[in-house]
Image: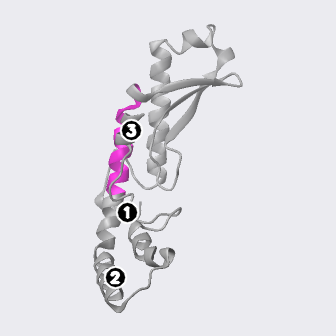
Amino acid sequence: MARNNILIKLVFGDIVANQNKISATEQFLEADENLGINETEQLKKYKEIYDNLVRKINSDLNTLSNLEGIIVQLRCIEMVPNEIKFSLLRDYIYARTTFYRPNNEIRDIRVIVGKLEDFDEPYETIIEYPEFILMAQNKLKETMSNIMKKNGIDVENLHEENLINY
């Protein structure tokens, strides 16, 4: 599990706001109010300077966060052969692997590889076949790439202008 944490660890992505959380800088500035700390004029002055500097670099922070997201997603795609896990649920064979998606707390992705009845072997045997594993890997990678494309990132034709709104 520690490797997964490193695989999907973000730096700027954990700083900027997203649909589910306010930015770390906003949380920092709101700490006084949340803790019931009296804001002196001196404290207000330094917080204002801090806020102004953050606003100046906010666009760059967002772009860096978007780049991190793409880099992490591409790393996840490359790690599918090492990270793939199988499960059986209601006669469906699922494959899952680590995958980062912005604004989503779930840090993996799952695909249905097939129905157990479509194979002539028991589940434990099927998931050991190299052809089956390769098919599952390809389905995962295709799904991951499609998610990135849906979010405006074409893995094959990456353009810098797409990073701003990712």
- Find numbered disc 3 in the image and state the secondary structure of the residue it sits on: helix
Q: Quadrant of residue 145?
A: top left
Magenta span includes 131 = no
Task: Please name whichever residue, 156 or 42, is drawn nearer the observer in this view of the structure.
Answer: 42
Q: Residue at x 34, y 85 (%)?
A: 43
For label 2, the crowd category at 10 Å Cα-Cα, with few meaning under 14, some 14 to 19 and many 20 or more, is some
Check disc 2 and report the residue beneath it: 47
- Find numbered disc 2 in the image and state the secondary structure of the residue it sits on: helix
Closer to the eye: label 3 or 1 = 1
Measured Cα–Cα span from mark 2 to mark 3: 38 Å
Check disc 3 and report the residue beneath it: 76
Closer to the eye: label 2 or 1 = 2
Residue range (magenta): 66-81
Hey, what amino acid is under mark 2? Answer: Lys
The image shows residue 38 at horizontal and vertical percentages of: 44, 85
The image shows residue 133 at horizontal and vertical percentages of: 47, 19
Q: Residue at x 38, y 58 (%)?
A: 13
SS assignment for the magenta stretch, majority:
helix
Check disc 1 and report the residue beneath it: 15
Measured Cα–Cα span from mark 3 to mark 1: 21 Å
The image shows residue 33 at horizontal and vertical percentages of: 48, 79
- Find numbered disc 1 in the image and state the secondary structure of the residue it sits on: loop
Q: Mark 3–mark 1 contact, CB under 8 Å? A: no
User: Relative to 45, does residue 24 appear above or below in the rendering?
Assistant: above
Tell which circle, 2 or 3, labels the residue nearer the N-terminal end. 2
Tell which circle, 2 or 1, labels the residue nearer the N-terminal end. 1
Tell which circle, 3 or 1, labels the residue nearer the N-terminal end. 1
